[in-house]
Amino acid sequence: ETVNGQEVGVAVLSLLYLVVVCSFCSSSSLFDIMATIANIYNLLFTHLDAFALARLALTSKSVYECYIQQKYAVAKQRFVVSLLKKGKKRTSEPVLWATVSVFELPKDFLKLQLTKSNELISRNVNSNDSDHKVSFTNSCGDSFTFYSQILAKPVSSSESSNPYLVLANSVDLSQMDFSSSAALLERQRAVLKRVTMKKAEFDPFTSLKQSSQKWVIMLCHGGYFAGAVYENSVVVDHKTDHRYVVRKKAGGRQVSYDKGGSQPKSAGASMRRYNEDKHQERIAEILQEWTHHIQQAHLIFLHAPGINRQFFFTESSPLQSTDARLRPVPINTEKPTFTEVQAVFKDMASVEVKLSL
């Protein structure tokens, strides 16, 4: 009753334009898009001017940002309610602090632009430049702190200048059909895309935005091996192995002692050498059994100090030392057991959130 036919026509065209923009710019379902359109339609005749909405619709970026912010606000409200139900207490300030799993974090939180605000060195005795947490803040004043190891890595300057290194880091060449020209062309496109990718276009949350993630965690030292495959927060498979390879009284690994030039022929030394070979063979068998998991994994965490590392990068191993998905474990670990692997996963997947209320 308060607008004329021309204004209504402009408003309808604006809403149709919103449908097109949201369809191309967002991967959300049609139901969510139509719900957003309905909300904007209600606001049109209560608070917004029809021509102002039309001008807004002419800028697709602004429309998309408004759409994302609206979804973020709804997701944030639901997330805060779920945290309060779990017993998280509010402070005297209008801020809610919580530590949650990255798999519990709503995907809409990562769609809003996040800018790096701080880098926090981990409280780790053996910490180095790569062992730190990264804090991000969005336009709503909410901050999120991740382990840097779970974020995607940008293309380094050495990779950009060396296409062969890019070729080694990207895809397993053993799975490529060199007799197919179409497959080679697709491979070349992927290499060129990675080489020419600009840092401004880099998104560290590429893998975290996906609905399903697969992580592989492996710990190995002192004759112990423990590994597990996670799909989101669910354990898909896990393996352990233990062999007597460490000299109990004198200490140290038998293979390390042999490298010093002295090779005792005692029964204990022979047993430890035999177990060393069996331990390496068992790890190779596990890697072969997990070939499909390793190929499908988004991230691979490996803690194998010293001589243990060479067990994972043999000629028959599906792992490559130059794999971009391969990450160190930046926290202190105890004896490799399945319980310790679970503790590492829980810590690595944790995200510290600070939400303004």
Image (cartoon, rainbow, N blue to C red):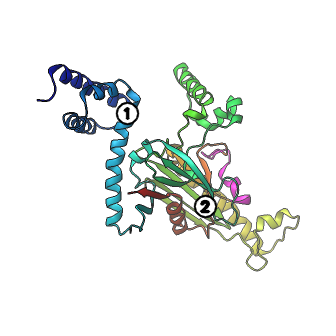
Farthest residue toward the right? Answer: 261
Residue nearest the observer in this picture, 330 or 271: 330
Residue 168, quarter of the rendered image? top right
Residue 178 seen in render:
no
**In the drawing, does residue 103 fall left or right of residue 120?**
left
The picture places residue 303, in percent across and down from the top left corner, at 64, 58
Residue 227 as seen in the image, left or right of residue 309: left
Query: Where in the figure is residue 3, as x and y percent of width and height?
Result: 16, 26
Near mark 1 (Cα within 10 A), the count class, few <14, some 14-19 or many ≥20, is: some
Q: Can you tell which of label 2 and label 1 is closer to the viewer?
A: 1
Q: Which is more toward the observer, 133 or 153?
A: 133
Q: Which disc, if any, is residue 219?
A: 2
Q: Residue at x 31, y 60 (%)?
A: 81
* 306 shown above or below 272: above
Is residue 100 shown left or right of residue 253?
Answer: left
**Amino acid type, label 2:** Leu
Magenta part of the protein: which range?
A: 305-320
Residue wearing tag 1: 64
What residue appears at the point 55 percent right and 19 percent down from the top-left corner? Answer: 181
Q: For numbered disc 2, what is the local secondary structure?
A: strand
Label pair 2/1, CB-CB below 8 angstroms? no
The image shows residue 50 at horizontal and vertical percentages of 24, 27
Give the numbered dot on residue 44. Answer: none
Q: N-terminal of the two: label 2 or label 1?
A: 1
Quarter containing the C terminus: bottom left
Q: Is residue 15 left or right of residue 3?
A: right
Decide if residue 281 is in sight here: yes
Q: Which residue is most to the bottom? A: 249
Residue name at image x 52 percent, y 20 percent: 182
**Residue 97: % across, % down:** 45, 63
Residue 255 vs residue 327, the one in the foreground: 327
* Amino acid type assigned to the residue bearing label 1 in the image: Tyr
